[in-house]
Image: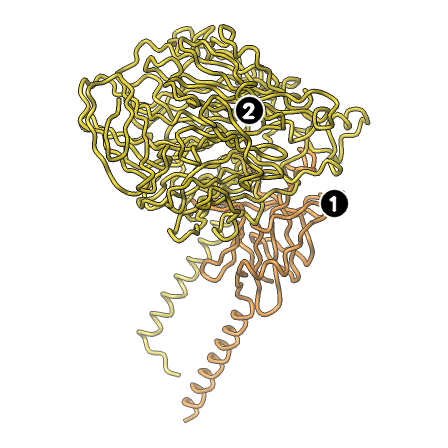
């Protein structure tokens, strides 16, 4: 009898744990926003290192984690910047909750970013100071790459630039 | 809870597998990822890295073993008297950089190709402080002799010209000219007596703003040509962006647009773009703007440069491609109900194979691999390759630039006009590219490129291209800051010649002197307007079969870079001594097969009639 009660308790705990995990997963699982939703949250311009530049709506993407946490990213027109800035700075990255980019922690904030030819994703603060640099993954099988998109694969969010991507996970 | 031996074994196995997985994860995390090959930044025009080169890579490249393909005979013709002008030599503003196109067409119906050269303008001319530069029409007298008939014809334009597209919009047998301007565009109606009349205002096609490479085509199959015109940048003279000359005088480098750290003219990125316009021709001969209704208005206001109506898929409806600068290219598939579906991204044409937007300038259309479908070659900015899209059928394209051999060599060049044409008449369409930079300042630096640049000519070896070397002193060895390019057989000798319109300079006339040229046939079409086919048969497809080789060419208005190639379709036949058949698919979907009385001749074929001469 006691053995049966213990079995029921263990099963109940496991079930609760599974249920909690499922709720947590649902809250943390990313949903890529549709194009029409982007117009509400993608800024038309972005300040970085002394200049404001217009953003490219067609090359912007956003995802929602859970119910109300967002990451937003997009390319900007960098024509007004000097060449050395343009080599590093291609777009903006905004998150309203702590995230992990390629396994490296990123706090709430607005940043500049760039995918570089050496297979790195670099995040900078608004003064242009380097914050993190993580390796990107190449998706050689991608059929129609785009300048910048977000997509989910296996419940994980990827930020693509062409065939290169970094994973974004919530913390 | 009872755990038996079997269950325990499964759990132990799972634990081991789990540990192995964790170990593999740790190891993989510690193992450096494979280094990806260098690639250019995404999303914009690459400005390249600040590498010093020992040579310009775009001039003075000759091959002593190369055959002479083109002779530059400009100075032997009256074309030497034409001077193109566009703004200042410094190119302070973007509107000074892209002019202008050139057209090869037979305006007087004498069977010889005439030449129309678009001219630019200056700020002083716009303000009435100096005489405006004039476009020019040269009548072909034969034997590379030309007569300047601009005054008599009345086609001087005297506005800031960008491009030209030929189409007989009123089906009266005289080819008309749409001249796109930075300012108000013109439609020169051919009066049939050697003169033209600007009817743009009267017919509602006097497009304002910045019009570029337009195209004529009957998209709704009503027998009347319609007109599509891309828009480039929305420039206001009272809100001009900072100029590089101002930067030099102030000593300020920041807040000016830069190329490799040097102030240059701004744009197009950072400047507002302009939408595109489709003019539908009504039964009374006037036009109406149906851009929005047809779904081709370009609401994102991409920077349009060159366009063409062409059959992309397998139906009989004319589709439309628009080449944009620094923004995605647009491919509109005709739905047959007066509207188009934009398929740039899913078709593969919007971006290159790495998902990058490129600075598209010019467009060549042709079936380079004899699979019966038209492919696209598009020219781009320097530090980026031109791009070749292979048509896979059903509106799908694959970027085959580097596999086909036209990628690597094109990187230092800034390309404009381009065309598929069979320069040696071997039965395979070769590829030509006119080049020239937009920043004069590149000549002051060792950036591996130059303001004036050589042409690129690629020979087609059954679907793969190899660059044709430049023989010393030949046309391929010289350099110009070229823009427009048009192809046609100017002397009727069966070898295709080329004309370039060059920035702030005289044009270039290149006589094809290839000695190894094969047999050929040239086909000019006359549509039956009673069958609702325009008289100049724009949109017709011609297939020429010799043995097991079947070539395709289309009658296309516009393309290259804001220019017009001859409407006559020239087929190289190689060593073939007989031609099996000529099949024509007319714009109304009907087909016609004709026989030729022999090779090495020019045929005129009338719909439902046959060979006229």
- Up-down: is B107 above or below B289? above
Q: Which residue, as the protein is rendered here, is positioned at the far right?
A: B250
Q: What residue is shown at x 54% (from left), y 30% (from top)?
A: B179
Closer to the camera, A4 or B338? B338
- The subunit carrying tag 1 is A
Q: Which residue is mark 2?
A: B155
Residue B170's disc is: none
Closer to the camera, B101 or B88? B101
Q: Could you say which quadrant of the image residue B522 lies in?
A: top left
Q: Which residue is mark 1?
A: A127
Distance from label 2 to label 1 (Cα)?
55 Å
- Up-down: is B431 above or below A20? above
Shade of chain A as shown in the rendered figure: orange
Q: Is residue B379 visible?
A: no
* Quadrant of the rendering where the N terminus of chain B is positioned: bottom left
Q: Is residue B411 left or right of residue B527?
A: right
Q: Is residue A128 visible?
A: yes
Closer to the camera, B85 or B352? B85
- The subunit carrying tag 2 is B
- Up-down: is B211 above or below B86? below
Q: Which chain is yellow?
A: B
Q: Which secondary structure lies at badge 2?
A: loop
Q: Is residue B66 left or right of residue B314?
A: right
């Amino acid at each position: 009898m006691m053995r049966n009660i213990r079995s029921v308790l263990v099963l109940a705990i496991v079930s609760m744990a599974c249920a909690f995990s499922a709720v947590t997963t649902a809250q943390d699982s990313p949903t890529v926003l549709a194009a029409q939703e982007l117009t509400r949250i993608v800024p038309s311009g972005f300040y970085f290192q002394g200049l404001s530049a217009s953003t490219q709506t067609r090359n912007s993407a956003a995802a929602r984690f859970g119910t109300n946490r967002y990451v937003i990213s997009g390319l900007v027109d960098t024509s007004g910047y000097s060449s050395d800035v343009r080599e590093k700075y291609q777009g903006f990255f905004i998150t309203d909750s702590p995230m992990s980019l390629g396994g490296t922690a990123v706090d709430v904030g607005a940043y500049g970013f760039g995918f570089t030819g050496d297979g790195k994703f670099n995040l900078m603060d608004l003064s242009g100071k380097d914050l993190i640099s993580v390796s990107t993954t190449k998706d050689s099988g991608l059929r129609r790459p785009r300048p910048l998109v977000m997509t989910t694969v296996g419940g994980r969010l990827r930020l693509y630039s062409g065939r290169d991507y970094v994973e974004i996970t919530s913390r | 809870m009872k755990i038996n031996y079997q269950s325990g074994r499964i759990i132990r196995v799972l634990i081991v597998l789990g540990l192995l997985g964790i170990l593999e994860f740790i190891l993989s995390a510690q193992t450096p990822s494979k280094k990806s090959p260098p690639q250019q930044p995404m999303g914009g025009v690459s400005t390249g890295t600040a590498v010093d080169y020992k040579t310009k890579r775009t001039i003075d490249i000759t091959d002593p073993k190369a055959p002479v393909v083109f002779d530059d005979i400009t100075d032997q013709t009256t074309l030497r008297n034409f001077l193109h002008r566009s703004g200042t030599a410094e190119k302070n503003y973007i509107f000074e950089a892209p002019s202008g196109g050139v057209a090869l067409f037979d305006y007087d119906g004498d069977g010889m190709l005439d030449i129309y050269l678009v001219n630019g303008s200056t700020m002083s001319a716009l303000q009435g402080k100096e005489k405006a530069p004039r476009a020019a029409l040269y009548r072909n007298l034969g034997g590379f002799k030309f007569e300047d008939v601009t005054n008599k014809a009345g086609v001087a334009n005297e506005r800031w010209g960008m491009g030209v597209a030929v189409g007989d919009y009123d089906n009266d047998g005289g080819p008309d000219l749409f001249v796109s301007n930075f300012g108000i565009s013109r439609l020169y109606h051919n009066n049939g007596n050697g003169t033209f009349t600007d009817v743009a205002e009267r017919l509602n096609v006097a497009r304002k703003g910045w019009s570029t490479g337009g195209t004529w085509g009957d998209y709704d199959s009503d027998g009347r040509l319609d007109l599509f015109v891309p828009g480039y940048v929305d420039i206001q003279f009272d809100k001009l962006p900072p100029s590089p000359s101002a930067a030099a005088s102030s000593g300020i480098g920041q807040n000016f647009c830069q190329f490799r750290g040097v102030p240059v003219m701004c744009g197009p990125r950072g400047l507002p773009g302009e939408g595109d316009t489709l003019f539908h021709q009504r039964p009374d001969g006037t036009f109406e703007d149906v851009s929005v209704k047809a779904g081709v208005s370009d609401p994102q206001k991409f920077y349009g440069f060159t366009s063409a109506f062409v059959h992309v898929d397998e139906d009989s409806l004319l589709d439309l491609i628009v080449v944009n600068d620094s923004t995605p290219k647009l491919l509109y598939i005709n739905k047959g109900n007066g509207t188009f579906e934009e398929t740039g991204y899913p078709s593969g044409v919007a971006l290159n194979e790495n998902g990058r937007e490129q600075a598209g300038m010019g467009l060549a259309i042709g079936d380079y691999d004899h699979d019966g479908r038209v492919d696209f070659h598009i020219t781009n900015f320097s530090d980026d390759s031109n791009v070749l899209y292979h048509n896979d059928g059903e509106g799908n394209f694959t970027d085959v630039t580097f596999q086909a051999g036209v990628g690597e060599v094109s990187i230092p060049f800034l390309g404009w006009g381009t065309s598929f044409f069979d320069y040696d008449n071997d039965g395979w369409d070769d590829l030509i590219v006119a080049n020239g930079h937009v920043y004069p300042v590149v000549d002051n630096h060792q950036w591996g490129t130059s303001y004036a640049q050589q042409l690129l000519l690629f020979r087609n070896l059954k679907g793969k291209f190899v660059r044709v070397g430049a023989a010393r002193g030949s046309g391929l060895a010289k350099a110009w800051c070229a823009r427009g390019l048009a192809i046609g057989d100017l002397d009727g000798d069966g070898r295709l010649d080329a004309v370039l319109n060059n920035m702030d300079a005289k044009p270039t006339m290149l006589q094809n002197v290839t000695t190894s040229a094969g047999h050929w046939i040239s086909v000019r079409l006359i549509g039956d307007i009673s069958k609702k086919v325009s008289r100049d048969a724009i949109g017709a497809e011609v297939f020429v079969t010799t043995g097991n080789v079947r070539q395709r060419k289309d009658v296309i208005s516009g393309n290259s870079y804001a220019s017009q190639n001859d409407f006559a379709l020239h087929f190289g036949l190689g060593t073939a001594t007989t031609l099996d058949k000529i099949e024509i698919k007319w714009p109304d979907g009907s087909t016609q097969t004709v026989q030729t009385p022999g090779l090495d001749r020019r045929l005129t074929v009338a719909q439902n009639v046959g060979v006229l001469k």
